[in-house]
Image (cartoon, rainbow, N blue to C red):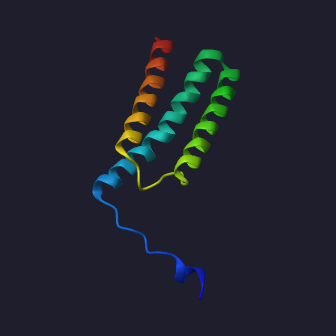
Amino acid sequence: MTQAHNTPAPQPTSVQQDVRAAVIAALMPFGAGMLLTLGYAWIGWFGLVLAAVGVAGWGFWWRGKHQQWFPQQVTTGTVVGQTVLIAVITLLLFITIS
């Protein structure tokens, strides 16, 4: 018997779960780019490097928490939390630029 025979079939997902996964898939790269831009706007090249370390830490924390980069089973609280975090980063960037 091979490993493929022992693997359970994937469970179907609902439209709501797919939408939350798609929102996270769009927000994570956008948030990473905004954080990199904010680091560069605040401190220059050194800020860019610090922000890159922060983005990598954020990504690996996310991967460790969900065991996948873009999981299908995402709670609404996770989406709201990521949205608020990225909104704060974006707000700080716009305040810095203006």
Q: Which of 43 and 5 is in front in this view?
A: 5
Q: Tag count in the figure?
A: 0
Residue 52 horizontal/vertical position (percent): 65, 33
Q: Please give left or right for residue 41 compared with residue 16 in the image.
A: right
Does 54 sit above or below residue 88?
below
For the point 58% across and 18% down, the residue is 41
Residue 1 horizontal/vertical position (percent): 59, 88
Does 14 sit above or below residue 98?
below
For the point 29% across and 52% down, the residue is 16
For the point 53% across and 80% down, the residue is 6
* Corner quadrant of residue 68: bottom right
Residue 85 horizontal/vertical position (percent): 45, 29
Q: Please give left or right for residue 30 compared with residue 63 in the image.
A: left
Q: Which of 90 and 69 is in front in this view?
A: 69
Q: Please give left or right for residue 54 compared with residue 11 in the image.
A: right
Question: As drawn, which residue projects farthest toward the left?
Answer: 15
Q: Please give left or right for residue 80 compared with residue 15 in the image.
A: right
Does 68 sit above or below residue 80?
below
Question: As drawn, which residue projects farthest toward the top?
Answer: 98
Does 8 sit above or below residue 67?
below
For the point 59% across and 42% down, the residue is 61
Q: Which of 11 and 56 is in front in this view?
A: 11
Residue 25 horizontal/vertical position (percent): 45, 47
* Corner quadrant of residue 49: top right
Question: As drawn, which residue projects farthest toward the bottom?
Answer: 1
